[in-house]
Image (tube, helix red, strand yellow):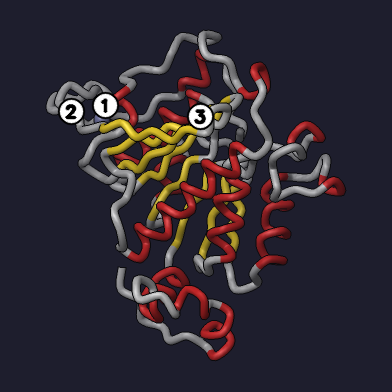
Amino acid sequence: MVATKTLTPYQVERYSRHIIMPQVGSAGQRKLLEAKVLVIGAGGLGSPISIYLALAGVGTLGIVDFDTVDVTNLQRQILHHDKDVGRSKVESAKETLNAYNPDVTVIAHEEPLTSDNAMQIMADYDIVVNGADNFAARYLINDAAYLSNKPLVDGSILMFDGQTTVFLPGQGCYRCVFPEPPPPGEVPSCAEAGVLGMLPGLVGTIQATETVKLIMDVGNSLSGRLLLIDALDMEFTTVKVRRNPNCPLCGDNPTVTELIDYAAFCGVPLVSA
Ligand SMILES: [Zn+2]
């Protein structure tokens, strides 16, 4: 990405702690301001992801969610406040993000992500960040990002465990490791098993970090590595992942060539973590 616009004096001051770093500078900050990032889910992961991206000055943030704020969300979903219970999550998210940084254009996509709209929604963005923590959504987002040739910053959480990685176009995907979704009911959801309130903060903040690194093209991304977080023992482990030639999506002889709505037969609602 090449940034063209110049920074206003206010922006120079606002983002001065970024700009002062040689890895960022004025050029990096301008890249952030011109970047368009799609965050899927305005829930546990989507909250820290979108808040930190907004604070960093990522100029356009798309937020996909069709849920309303529930009182059980407030233990971890820092986009939403007590007064927001019952409100649309994307509306609540937009208000919070613009309160943090009015410089950011927040685009609300208040609709469930499906095989019909996923690639159309992704088309307008540079990077996709997954904050929707269920298997139907994870496979749909993985497949749509790959078929759209977009980098995907993935993350998931359950109980005290989290994991996150980056999939760059042509360098592997979620199906390289896990070719098919588990049978319905085999893996519990956060609603069934629970999740520690600050765990999405840990994982989502790492996803936001990876996203700004991709935008500015600095450092080594988590592409090719899966970061596993065990908060109970507070251990961080990385395992190598690589493109699998037998992958049903990005392998040499793909069998998945169009999007699949697993929700239709899993019976899993596409809600955010
Ligand atoms: Zn793959």
Q: Earlier in the sequence, mark 3 or mark 2?
A: 3
Expressed as whole percent of the image width and height from the top left, the position of residue 105 reads: 58, 66
Quadrant of residue 132 in the image?
top right
Give amino acid for label 1.
Cys
Residue pictured at 36% horizontal, 81% vertical: 4
Ligand 1 lies in which image quarter? Answer: top left
Q: Residues within 10 Å of mark 2 (few under 14, many from 20)?
A: some
* Residue at 43% in and 71% down: 34
Q: Name the quadrant of the C terminus.
A: top right
Marking on residue 230: 3
Task: Please identify the quarter of the rendering in which residue 95 is found.
Answer: bottom right
Three-letter amino acid code of the residue under disc 2 = Gly
**Residue at mark 3 to residue at mark 2: CA–CA distance:** 31 Å
Secondary-structure class at tag 2: loop
* Distance from Cα at disc 1 to Cα at disc 2: 8 Å
Query: On screen, 188 above or below 43?
Result: above
Q: Which residue is mark 1?
A: 176
Name the image quarter holding the N terminus: bottom left
Q: Position of residue 134 (x, y in %)?
A: 53, 26
